Amino acid sequence: MPARYHHGDLRAELVRTSVGLIAEQGLEGFSVAKVARRAKVSPGAPYRHFADRESLLAAVAYTITGQLTDRVRTATRSHADPEAALAAAAGAYTGYLIERRAGLHIVFADSLQGPRHTELHERTRELIDQFLLLCLSVSASPQLALELLEQLLTQAHGYGTCYLDGFFRRHGYSADLVVHKSAEAARMVIRGYRERTE
């Protein structure tokens, strides 16, 4: 085994390798066996750190959620206006999804919603709360803020998915253009919610 895997580093390496594998092949291409091959360890080595595929995927989702949270925080930091910050957050989500093929479809995977994964759930709340606080600042009520949150995340994910599935690329759209379109579409939705009172 290569020296870098000594002293407990293999667990982190397996997570990094998994994130890279998903970025190339999507969630459908993820397996413990593929991760082991890429990490150049035996097929049984990952199971010394993760009980099963679900446990490894939970660690991957935890990493993805942290990266997304940082990406959104960075995108919103320079915007004093909550509308602009929220639109930037939506664009940041789309950009991350395109870059890593990872987003809420992994974070909220059915297999990761049980009580085994409380650390993941807490980190996910951090991410969602960033969006929700901004939604509350531009909405007339908590209910409208929740509706806006749902629409923005669904829309931002949809833009990224359409790019990854080839729909936008067939029309000559670059990844940067899709991120821009996602943010602009978010801005239009936000303005509509700002005008609603119920």
Image (cartoon, helix red, strand yellow):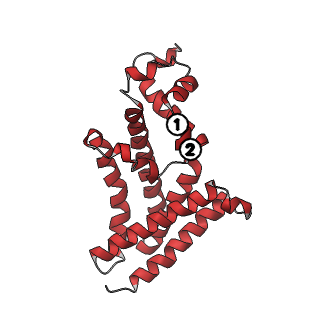
Q: Position of residue 38 (x, y in %)?
A: 57, 26
| Labels 1 and 2 touching (C-beta < 8 A) | yes
Mark 2 surroundings within 10 Å by alpha-carbon count, few (fewer than 14), some (14 through 19), many (20 or more): some
Whether residue 78 is visible here, answered yes or no, is no
Residue neighbourhood size for the residue with mark 1, other residues' Cα within 10 Å, grouped as few (<14), some (14–19), many (≥20): some
Residue 53 in the image: x percent, y percent? 42, 32
- 108 left or right, relative to 19: left
* Residue 36 x %, y %: 52, 24
**Residue 15 versus residue 28: which sits nearer the camera?**
28
Please tell me which residue is depicted at 46% across the width and 33% down the height of the picture: 15
Front residue of this view, candidates 78 and 167: 167
Query: Looking at the picture, does residue 192 appear above or below residue 61?
Result: below
Pick the quarter of the image with the C terminus: bottom left
For the point 33% across and 73% down, which residue is it? Answer: 145
Q: Is residue 116 left or right of residue 69?
A: left
- Helix, strand or loop at label 2? It is loop
**Numbered label tally:** 2
Q: What amino acid type should be assigned to the residue bearing mark 2?
A: Gly
Q: Is residue 36 visible?
A: yes
Picture residue at 39% right of the left edge, 42% below the top: 62
Q: Which residue is mark 1?
A: 30
Q: Secondary structure at mark 1?
A: loop
Q: Is residue 137 above or below residue 94?
A: below
Residue 119: mark: none
Pointer 2 residue = 26
Alpha carbons under labels 1 and 2: distance apart: 7 Å
Residue in view at x 31 percent, y 81 percent: 140
Which x, y percent locates residue 160?
A: 57, 58
Q: Amino acid at mark 1?
A: Phe
Give the image quarter of residue 34. top right
